[in-house]
Amino acid sequence: MEAAAESPEFHTVYSAVKVLKGSNPELRKLLYFKVYKRRWFVLLVLCLLNCSNATLWLTFAPVADQSAQYLGVSLEDINWLSLVCMVVAVPLSLGTTWMLDTLGLRITLILGSWLNMFGALLRFCGTLAGEPITIRYPLVMFGQTLTALAQPLIIFAPTKLAALWFPEHQRATANTIASMSNPLGILLANIISPVIVRTPAQIPTLLLCYAIPTCIICFLATVGIRSSTPPTPPSASAEASTSEPFLQGLKLLMKNKSYLILLLCFGAGMAVFSSFSTLLEQIMCVQGYTNDFAGICGALFIVFGIVGAGVLGVYVDKTKHFIEVTKINLSLTALACIAFSVVSLLREQKAAIAAVCSLFGFFGYAIYPVAMELSVECSYPVGEATSAGLLFISGQVQSVAYIVLLQGLTTKLADSPLATCGDDVLNWRVPLMVMAGLFSLFTCIFVLFFDTRYKRLEAEEEAMYGIKPASGSTTTEHSLSINT
């Protein structure tokens, strides 16, 4: 198909069919909109980049004690190796969305892959035995900062890639695959780091194991991604590709009521998930649950989340029920959050806690790629990276606020005989109830007040069939005709 599409004969037909716009939509769709096998290669590179960057972000957290000993620093300093990604990502996010929508996917991904590789290699070099212990941590932090610079370049790309390279019936699936490679990387880091590092001296070996794949991925991105877009568009919206200028797009988003509701409520959901992942071990140790069991619950949370996202990605690609799926799943996630806030305070309830964590991940993680697609649908023709990127920024900012708030609401327990937390045993009852209450509040706001037209699907339908949707149309009926 690619060879045919790149031939002069094809482009003659391509130009001729373009003239037929609206007069023979089925013929136009058959001959004009083409998909290319290389789209799967571009998706693979993005998935590998996303997974690799996530493992680099969380490298030290599962082996914090050994890392602190080898680098000669405190545990708080080790925590900053993870927090630096959040600190760096937020101020750079707007620049990243501009780069994706203006300079294109290819330049953004290649730059991200080089930053990812240099950061990983610098971290390894900083831990070599010949280096004085006083400069190990600064070198590792500098390398970690480079990987943090790469994070927004990579994590904002799935929606853009899906829009430019995939047809309308595969966009949500492609977005899901690319987005869920990030939690897969987090899961791998939680597994690989403790397996390799048994003593502090094995930290350099761990960093070398993480650095080697980044070199391979950088080579694949630099050599393999030859263009930001395919030779011919896969859909009508990709053909038009008339994203608003960056600043104009921001102004339009700030005036879009539906988008602002999504921005607030989805950001709150991301904040709750970040709080859950960050504080899970501290919450569960109070009732005597071990770190190993907390790790198992965290793994179940991610694994079932990836499964749920895969199922929903395929479903929404076939049905285009973005709003219905998001509202239902957000409501079920709120129920799972309430359940966790109750069962995590009970002793000897391993089965119940594991089940709740699995459901929390299954319903909650599945929302992420669907909400990213929904953000594009309700804000079109604003650039995909801009609309999806602002959701990520909202989640990051609210995550910091939630974690600070929840930790501030804790109180020290005078006596907790089963606790495995060491000296600092905290009461998490009030913070958990506040977290569940906030999540439920924002879920209710979203369910009651969010509504939008599927603007991108409508634009595709009008471009393909010459049918202009009725003003005020908000549901899926109109967009479903694209698939029939």
Image: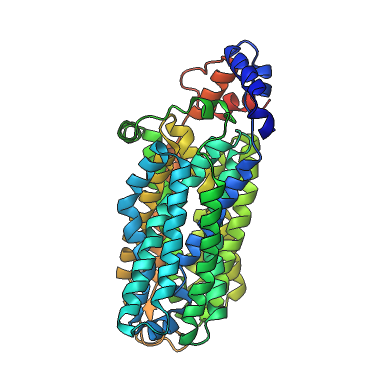
Kindly give the residue lying farthest to the top in the view shown: 23
Quadrant hosting residue 107: top left
State how many labels appear: 0
Up/down of 326 relative to 436, above or below: above
Q: Is residue 440 visible?
A: no
Q: Position of residue 413 (x, y in %)?
A: 35, 82
Locate the C terminus and report the quarter of the image it occupies.
top right
Q: Position of residue 477 (x, y in %)?
A: 60, 26
Kindly give the residue lying farthest to the front in the view shown: 8
Q: Is residue 39 visible?
A: yes
The answer to which of 257 and 135 lies nearer the viewer is 135
The answer to which of 391 and 16 lies nearer the viewer is 16
Q: Position of residue 87 (x, y in %)?
A: 32, 60
The residue under the point 59% across, 19% down is 464
Q: Which colouring convention does the figure follow?
A: rainbow
Q: Position of residue 134 (x, y in %)?
A: 30, 82
Up/down of 155 relative to 280, above or below: above
For residue 339, side relative to residue 118 (left or right) = right
The residue under the point 33% across, 82% down is 73
The answer to which of 39 and 5 lies nearer the viewer is 5
Quadrant hosting residue 232: top right
Locate the N terminus and report the quarter of the image it occupies.
top right
The residue under the point 63% across, 17% down is 12
Up/down of 42 relative to 464, above or below: below
Up/down of 108 relative to 278, above or below: above
For residue 162, side relative to residue 156 (left or right) = right
